[in-house]
Image: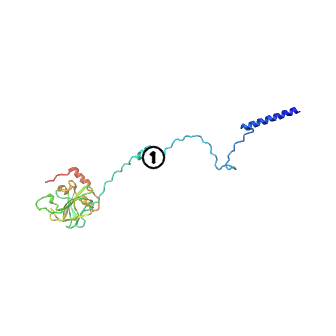
């Protein structure tokens, strides 16, 4: 009996030694506890579910809607925008002789011009913004001797900002301060209607429109190259008809011709 009891004690000791060895090596001696399962709202659980692992995906770059992200848009942005077509310049025009009675003919003898009939002393106005280029305050005309340079008596010519020359002659007075090189505005007073020069003793303003060929001295062009009546008709009604195109046509066809005599 004692011998059998010693065997049992010995086997028990061996079992205890084996269990201690397994525990020291990190291996569990019993069933492994199951991993905790998360349930929304369960006591002790977090308010946010733990993220589940998602498959690894390589996203392809998406084009940006910004103009700088597109090479073509960026290139076009670096180029200067095409300029818009410039609008034709506009000018203000004024009828040259205000007041009443005032009249004029659509035609003129020998060359394109017109005579604006008005009382002596009526004001003469600049028909547009521009620069005075020629002034006469002398009346050296001798009746019976045709002399182009002296036919106008007292006169003023100016070149408008539109590039057209405007001429008024037979004046009785040219205002002080009206000199070559002086800037004038549309409607500014230049002097008075008169009958100096070859005016046949009739108060009127000889009015001519021409290209500014030599600006001064070319009396045969200065006296008139384009018919003024259609433009005077417009200006008298506060219209804006411009002689620029007609003067350009004349210049293209004739240039700046020499004096007739």
Looking at the image, residue 36 sits to the left or right of residue 76; the answer is: right
The image quarter containing residue 198 is: bottom left
Near-viewer residue (6 or 233): 6
What x and y, as percent, mark residue 165? Answer: 23, 57
Near-viewer residue (65 or 245): 65
Looking at the image, residue 193 sits to the left or right of residue 87; the answer is: left
Q: Residue at x 47, y 47 (%)?
A: 66
Q: Is residue 247 above or below residue 177?
A: above
Looking at the image, residue 131 sits to the left or right of residue 27; the answer is: left
Q: Residue at x 79, y 35 (%)?
A: 15
Q: Is residue 173 above or below residue 90?
A: below
Near-viewer residue (102 or 87): 87
Mark 1, Cα crowd under 10 Å, few <14 / some 14-19 / many 20+, is some
In the picture of the structure, the residue carrying the numbered disc 1 is 68
What x and y, as percent, mark residue 189? Answer: 24, 64
Looking at the image, residue 212 sits to the left or right of residue 143; the answer is: right
Which secondary structure lies at badge 1?
helix
Check the picture and name the quadrant holding the N terminus: top right
What x and y, as percent, mark residue 137? Answer: 18, 63
What x and y, as percent, mark residue 124? Answer: 23, 64
Question: In the current view of this chain or complex, which residue is farthest to the right?
Answer: 1
Check the picture and name the quadrant holding the C terminus: bottom left
């Amino acid at each position: 009996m004692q011998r059998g009891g010693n065997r049992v004690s010995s086997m028990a000791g061996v079992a205890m030694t084996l269990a201690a060895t397994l525990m020291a090596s990190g291996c569990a001696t019993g069933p492994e506890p199951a991993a905790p399962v998360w349930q929304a709202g369960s006591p002790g659980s977090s308010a946010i579910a733990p993220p589940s692992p998602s498959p690894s995906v390589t996203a392809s770059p998406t084009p940006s809607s910004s103009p700088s992200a597109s090479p073509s848009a960026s290139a076009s942005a670096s180029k200067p925008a095409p300029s818009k077509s410039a609008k034709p310049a506009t000018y203000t025009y004024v009828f040259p002789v205000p007041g009443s009675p005032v009249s004029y003919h659509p035609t003129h003898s020998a060359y394109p011009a017109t005579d604006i009939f008005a009382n002596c002393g009526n004001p003469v106005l600049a028909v547009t913004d521009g620069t005075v280029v020629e002034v006469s305050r002398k009346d050296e005309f001798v009746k019976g001797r045709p002399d182009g340079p002296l036919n106008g008596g007292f006169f003023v010519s100016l070149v408008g900002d539109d590039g057209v020359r405007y001429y008024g002659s037979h004046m009785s007075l040219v205002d002080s301060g009206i000199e070559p090189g002086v800037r004038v505005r549309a409607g500014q007073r230049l002097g008075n209607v008169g009958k100096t020069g070859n005016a046949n003793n009739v108060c009127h303003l000889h009015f001519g429109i021409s290209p500014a060929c030599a600006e001064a001295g070319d009396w045969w062009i200065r006296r008139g190259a384009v018919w003024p009546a259609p433009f005077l008709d417009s200006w008298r009604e506060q219209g804006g008809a411009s002689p620029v195109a007609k003067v350009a046509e004349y210049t293209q066809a004739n240039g700046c011709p020499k004096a007739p005599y």
